[in-house]
Image (tube, rainbow, N blue to C red):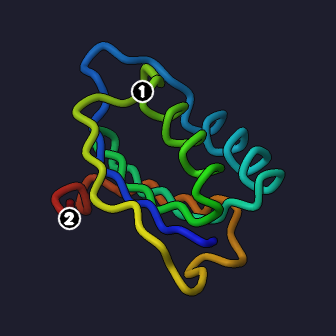
Amino acid sequence: MLYHLLYISETKDNSSFDMDSIVQNSKVYNKKHHITGALWFNGTTFVQMLEGDRKELTTVLARIMRSDAHHKFELVFFEPATERIFSDWSMAYYHASKDEQDIV
């Protein structure tokens, strides 16, 4: 059964991570596990929606929550869905500019 998951998190003040690597690794993993979604990042805040099988999303969610990149994690929803929103995207990624950082 298809599920949608949305979370918001912040980066830790002292965290160091490579967003390009995270996005590329996510694309490969997600494609292999039939997960689609989108990630928005403004330098301090992540907003991500993922779509896929409940078991696969639970596994990904656990990986994300263990990541050093995430802090103050908030699961907004994790619920059944009837169709994919990002069916053509294993991982759409948008890095916000300084002018857009207040959107979240």
Position of 6 relative to 32 (above/below): below
Q: Which mark is residue 87?
A: none
The residue positioned 65% from the left and 50% from the top of the image is 56
Give the amino acid type for the residue marked by disc 1 in the picture. Answer: Ala
Residue hosting label 1:
69
Q: Residue furthest top?
A: 14
Position of residue 50 measured from the top left corner of the image (x, y, whole percent): 53, 61
Figure quadrant of residue 34: bottom right
Taking 79 as reference, is 72 left or right? left
Q: Residue 39, percent across and down?
A: 48, 56
Q: Secondary structure at mark 2?
A: loop
Percent position (x, y) of residue 97? 34, 56
Look at label 2 and name its amino acid.
Answer: Ile
| Secondary structure found at label 1 | loop
Would you call the spot at circle 1 few (<14 residues within 10 Å), some (14-19), or many (20 or more)? many
Q: Is residue 101 left or right of residue 50?
A: left
| Residue wearing tag 2 | 103
Q: Is residue 33 left or right of residue 69?
A: right
Q: Residue at x 39, y 50 (%)?
A: 41
Nearest the viewer among 63 and 94 is: 63
Which one is earlier in the sequence, the residue at label 2 or at label 1? 1
> Residue most toward the bottom?
82
Q: Residue 62: x percent and y percent? A: 50, 33
Quarter of the picture containing the N terminus is: bottom right
Q: Residues within 10 Å of mark 2 (few under 14, many from 20)?
A: few
User: Residue, x 36% and y 30% (percent of image)?
Assistant: 70
**Real-space CA distance between mark 2 and mark 1, rounded to the nearest whole angstrom:** 20 Å
In the image, taking residue 23 as reference, residue 7 lies left or right, namely: left
Does 89 appear above or below 15?
A: below
Vertical relation: 55 (above or below) 63: below
Q: Which quarter of the rendering shows the C terminus?
A: bottom left
Query: Of discs 2 and 1, which sits in the foreground?
Result: 1
